[in-house]
Image (cartoon, rainbow, N blue to C red):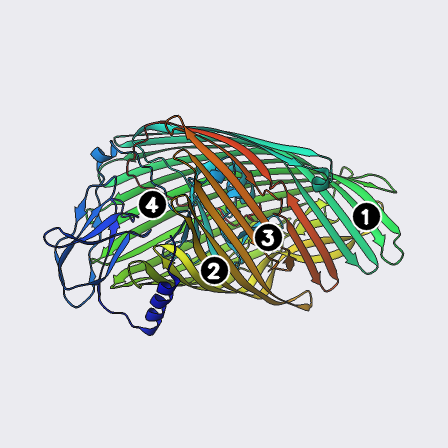
Amino acid sequence: MPISMKYLFVCVLCCCCGVLYGQSVTGHIVDGHQQPVAFANVSLLSPQDSAVRSTLTDGNGTYHFGKVSPGRYKVAISIIGFKQAASSLFNMISTDVILPDIQLVADSKQLSDVIVTGRKPFLEQRADKLIVNVQSSVLAAGATAAEVLRRVPGMRVLNDRVTMTGKNKLIIMVDGRLSQYQDMNVLLRAIPASNIDRIEVISNPSAKFDAEGDTIINIVLKRRQIAGTNGTIGFAMGADPYTLNEVKQGNQLYQRYNPSVSANHRSGKFNVFGSYNYIYRTQFEVNIINRYNNNNYYDQRNYNPSNYGIHTYQAGADFKADSLNTIGIVVNAFNRKGNGDFQNVSLQTNTTNGSLTDAFNSQNLQNNINNNQALNINWRHTFAKAGQSLTVDADAAHYLLDNTSDIYVYPITGKIIHNYQRIKNPINFETIKADYLQPLGKNSKFESGFKTSLAKIDNNLLFEQNNLIDAGRSNRFLYRENINAAYGNFYTTLGKWDFQAGLRAEQTVANGTSSGQKVLNRNYVQAFPSLLLTRRLDSVLAITGQYSRRIGRPSYQQQNPFEVYLDPLTYTKGNPLIKPQTTNSAKLSLTYTGLPVLALSYDQTSDVIVDYAPQQKTVVDANGVPRLVSFSVADNLAKAQNFTAQLNFPIKAGKVVDGYGGLITTLQRYAALYQGSTFEAEKWSYVFFAQADVKISATWAAQFSAYYATSSQYEFIKAGRNSSVDLGIAKKFLNNHGKISLSVSDLFFGDRTLGNINYEDIDLHLKQYNDTRNIILAFVYSFGSQHLKAAGTRTSGADEETKRVKTNL
C-alpha cells in the first residue's frame, strides 16, 4: 500500500498549524464481550439508504468519516460472523458527531456456512500497542517463541539475554501471564511458535497492567473459537549443520524434533480444550572471553554442547452458566530435563615476553530439572447494562528448579580440582485479581480493579570442593514478596480526540534471609500515572501521544548473594542491597490506516538495574595457584536516558508481495558512580529491518525476514553489530487442511554477540554465539470443523506475575 508522501506531509502540517475544517462522524464497534471489532465494513448512508462513502474499522474498532456535508445520515455495519447492524438517523449540522457504541450480535446461521480465510497484516498499530501477527508466518513453523521474538522489530539477544532497542527493563508475558518467579529462558524455548497467534508490544502500558517493566512483550497463544470438535496435529524436525571453523570442535550436526497436538470441543454452554507439545533439541553455545590485566593476557574459550526435552500440557474448560455468567478453569504443566557438557580451555600469557604462565582445562557437567504446575479459576459477570462487566481470577502455581554442576579443573601442574554445585529452588505463589468496567454515558467508561500476590521462594545452594562442603560458598536464601495494587482508568471520546488517563498504586513488601541472617527488608508504596491521547486527522491518519511512569523491581536472583560459577574464572552474584528502578516514558506516534509510520520516544530511568556490572579479583585455588577471576554482580546505576525514533514503510508489489520495512535510531546515555569512579557512556545505534510475504499461488507462499543492527551500548557492554536473514516456503494441500513448510533461519550465521567492556582496570572482550542457523521442515494438519464461532479470549489473575526471573534466552 504505497503512501503519497506529499499527502502525508500536508496532513501533518495542517495538524500542526491547526488548519482543520469540516465536520466528522466517529464511533466504535464492539462485540458481545465489549471487545473491539476490527476490519468491519462501515457505510455512511442517506435516509434513503444510498451509500455516501464507506470505510473499515481499525484495530480499536473505531471508524471515522471526515468532511461530511450537513444533512441526515445513519451508519450501517457488516462483517462476516455477525448480524448486520445500523445506527439511528442523526443530524449533521455544524459540529462533529460522536455516535454511541454499536454492539454486534453473532450470526450463528451465517457462521455455520462460512469458513474465514482472511489474513491480518503482519503489523498493526493500535492506540496502546503494536500487534505482530505471526499466526500465518511461514517462518514460525517448527520454531520456538524465543526464535520468533528475534523477528519483532527492535528485538535483540545480547549476552544471552533478550533486549529491545532503547529499553532498560523488558518484560515477557505469555497470554498476559507474567511470573517474576519462573525461568522465562526455559519457557520461551518450550513454546512452539506454531501455537502463537500474535505478539503484543506495549511500550507504555496503562494503569490496568502491573507497573513492572517499561515495555511489555505479550505472547498471545492461539485459542480455537470454532463450533464443534476440532484441533491440529503437527510434527517438525530440524537440522543445524556447523563446520569446524564455526564450532571449533569438528563438524557437527545439531537436531530437533517437535510433535504436537491440540483439540477443542465447543457445544452449547461448554467449551473444553487441551494441548500437548514435546520438544527435543541438541544445541551448542560458544563463549570466548579475552581479558587484559597489567602484563597478563587471559584467553578463555568455552564450547557448551547440551540437549534437553520439554513436555508442556494444557487443559481447561469454560461453562456459560447463563447469559450473564461464565466460569472457567485452566491447568498448565511444564516438565523439562536437560544436560550439558561445558568444556573450557584457559590460557594466561605474559604480554611482555609472550611466555605461557598458566593454563588449565575444565569441564562442567550439568543436569537441569525444571517443573511447574499452575491453576487458574476465573469468573466473568456481564451486567444487564451494555458494557458493564466484572471479572475475577484466582491463580496458584508451584515451580521447582533443581540444577547440578560437576566442575572438574585440570591444571598443567597440581592435582585435579572437583567442585560440585547444586541449586534447588522450590517456588510457590498465589494471586487474586478483580476488574470492573462501568460505562459512563455514550462515549466514556471507567475501569477499576485490585490485585494481590504472594510469593514464597526457598533457594538452597550447596557447594563442595573435592567432596568437602564449602561453608563459605554454600548458602540458603529465603525470599518472601507480597505486592498489593489498585487502579482506576478513565476513557472518553470527544470529537476527533480519544483520551485515556489512569492511576495505579502498588505496595511492595519484601524480605529475605541468607544463611539465617536477614539481608533484605522492604515495605514501600508508589503511584504510577499513565496518559494516552489520540487525534484523528482524517479517515486514515492519526497521531497518538503517551506517557507512563513504571517500576523495575529486582528479581529474587538479583537480590540473592549466591556465587554461581559458570567456569573456574567466571561467576555471577546477586546483591541484596539493590534498589528498584523507576522509568518515566513519553511517546509520540503517527499511524496510517492503523499501520505504524513514525514514532518518537524518550525514556529516563533512575537507579538503573544492571545485570552485568563487572568486577574482578584474585582468587587462590585448591592447589594454591592465584588466578584472576571476573564476575558480574547486579547493581544500580544513577541514570540512563534513551531517545528513539522509528520509521516504518510498506513493501508492496501488486497482489503478490506484501510486507514492511523500517529503521530504528537510538541514542543511549548512562551516567553513574561505580566502584569509586565515574561511568559515562553515550552511543548512537541503528537497526534496519524488513519482512515480506510472497503469494506464489493459492496454495504456495514464501516469506523473507532480515535485520541488521549496528554497534550499541548495553549497560557496561559496548555491543558489536549483528544481523540475520531468514527464508521460508510453504504449501497447502488436503483441501487446505494440511500445510508443509521448509525454512532456514540466520542463513549467513550473523546473529552473534560481540562486546567490549573497558572500565577502570577491566579490559574484557566477549564473543558469544549459538545455533541460530536452523533448517526446519514442519507439517501441520487441521481436523474437524473449521467454521468460526465468536468467542471471547481471557487472561488470568497471574497475568502480570511471570516476569522477574531474568528473561535470558
Q: Amino acid at mark 1?
A: Leu
Closer to the camera, 578 or 46?
A: 46
Give the residue at the far left of this rendering.
48
Q: Amino acid at mark 4?
A: Val
Nearer the observer, disc 1 or disc 3? 1
Residue at numbered disc 3 = 558
- Residue, far front: 654
Secondary structure of the residue carrying tag 4 is strand
Residue that numbered label 2 is attached to: 646
Mark with earlier residue (1, 4): 1
Find the distance from the CA under tag 1 to the CA under tag 2: 44 Å
Q: Amino acid at mark 3?
A: Gln
Left or right: 225 as drawn, with respect to 107: right
- For this view, does 758 lie left or right of residue 528? right
- Marks 4 and 3 sit apart, C-alpha to C-alpha, by 32 Å
Q: Which residue is mark 1?
A: 347
Residue 183 visible to the viewer: no
